Amino acid sequence: MSSNNAHESFLIYRGLKFFWLAIALVFVVIVLYIWHEPLDEPNGGSWLGYTLGVISAALVLWLTWFGVRKRQYALSATKLKVWLSAHIYFGLALVVIATLHSGFQIGWNIHSAAYILVLLTVASGVFGVFVYVRYPKLMTKNRAGLSLDEMMGKISELDQDILKEGQQLPEEINSALLKAVRKTSIGGNIFEKLSPKNVICPTTEARNLIETKFADMSLQDQHISKVIALLAKKTKLLRRARRDIQIKVILRIWLFFHIPLAIGLLGTLFSHILAVFFYW
Ligand code: HEM
Ligand code: HEM
């Protein structure tokens, strides 16, 4: 059953079209492997072995080409989804085809290095799919209708109010508030983006200072209670803005594994082909 729903996920694109195509390919390859009776034990050097090797290498080139396709200016969101859907299912099919190509002869050599890189690249891809399915939902929930820009806008509005209130307050509070406005950062380096909980936040510090040291004054001085409320609002927004950035980083970070693994695979594949033609 197929549908043209624009929101259809890349996983079930057109009723799993590429899933079934990949299954069909794997099925044919397995049947050939069982039917085939090599002179020797099964290995990459029989006619079927060569055929499966060439199919595997063609798949690797095509899968890597996705990195180029992705960046092509004219590629629409729908086309990207088509490519990604095909990429995932043929990427998984590659595991079976490359395994049968090797005739299960895995050992400590350059051939098996190529094979292991296939497995690692595919594993990182599977992890990426998990991330793409899970995190966008979390992001929408965390944003609760506000974009990151809108959160930032609200934060700087709160900052104005905080500064205004601060002018009426004792020097210690006022300077903590000034620091909270000037030195609070959202984002930062990769580690800070990934674990915002470990970042020392001047806004939280100012809030803690007032709530511990000046809490009883807040009963008499309405500027203090107002500033406490403003700081509470700001810390809440900060937490959401930092979480938004954290999710964005997680959505990208697995590619730092997937892409180098894919490139490493290309390199070892090339060496494997050279090795079998020149040294065997
Ligand atoms: C992703 C692509 C490929 C992977 C992961 C891969 C992996 C392997 C592995 C693990 C073996 C078993 C090595 C052994 O017997 O110890 C093997 C054997 C072999 N491969 Fe590949 N291969 C790939 C593509 C190719 C291509 C494109 C060709 C040739 C055009 C090729 C030619 C061979 C040959 C001739 C053998 C047999 C070597 C022998 O046992 O004497 N392979 N391959
Ligand atoms: C040996 C097999 C594979 C190779 C060589 C390969 C290679 C690549 C390359 C070069 C990219 C482009 C990354 C970029 O430039 O941003 C990519 C993206 C991707 N791959 Fe693979 N891949 C393989 C298998 C898989 C598998 C099996 C899956 C999933 C099960 C997968 C999931 C993805 C995803 C989700 C993306 C990101 C798409 C995006 O951000 O738009 N890959 N892959």
Image (cartoon, rainbow, N blue to C red):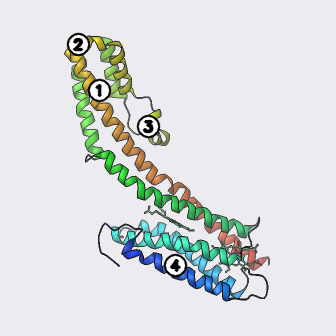
Residue hosting label 1? 231
The residue drawn where x is 38% and y is 40% is 242
**Left or right side of 9 for 44:** right
Quadrant location of the N terminus in the rendered image: bottom left
- In the image, residue 243 sits, relative to residue 219, either above or below, namely below
- In the image, residue 49 sits, relative to residue 65, either above or below, namely below
In contact (CB < 8 Å): disc 4 and disc 3: no
Residue hosting label 3? 196
For disc 1, does the CB lie below 8 Å from ligand 2? Answer: no
Helix, strand or loop at label 2? It is helix
Q: Measuring from the top left, give residue 39's x and y in whole percent.
A: 78, 88
Question: Which residue type carries mark 3?
Answer: Pro
Tell me the CA gap for discs 4 and 3: 43 Å
Tell me the CA gap for discs 4 and 1: 56 Å
Helix, strand or loop at label 3? It is helix
Please state which of residues 67 and 93 is positioned toward the viewer in this rendering: 93
**Left or right side of 137 for 107:** right
Question: Which residue type carries mark 2?
Answer: Leu
Quadrant housing residue 61: bottom right
Helix, strand or loop at label 4? It is helix
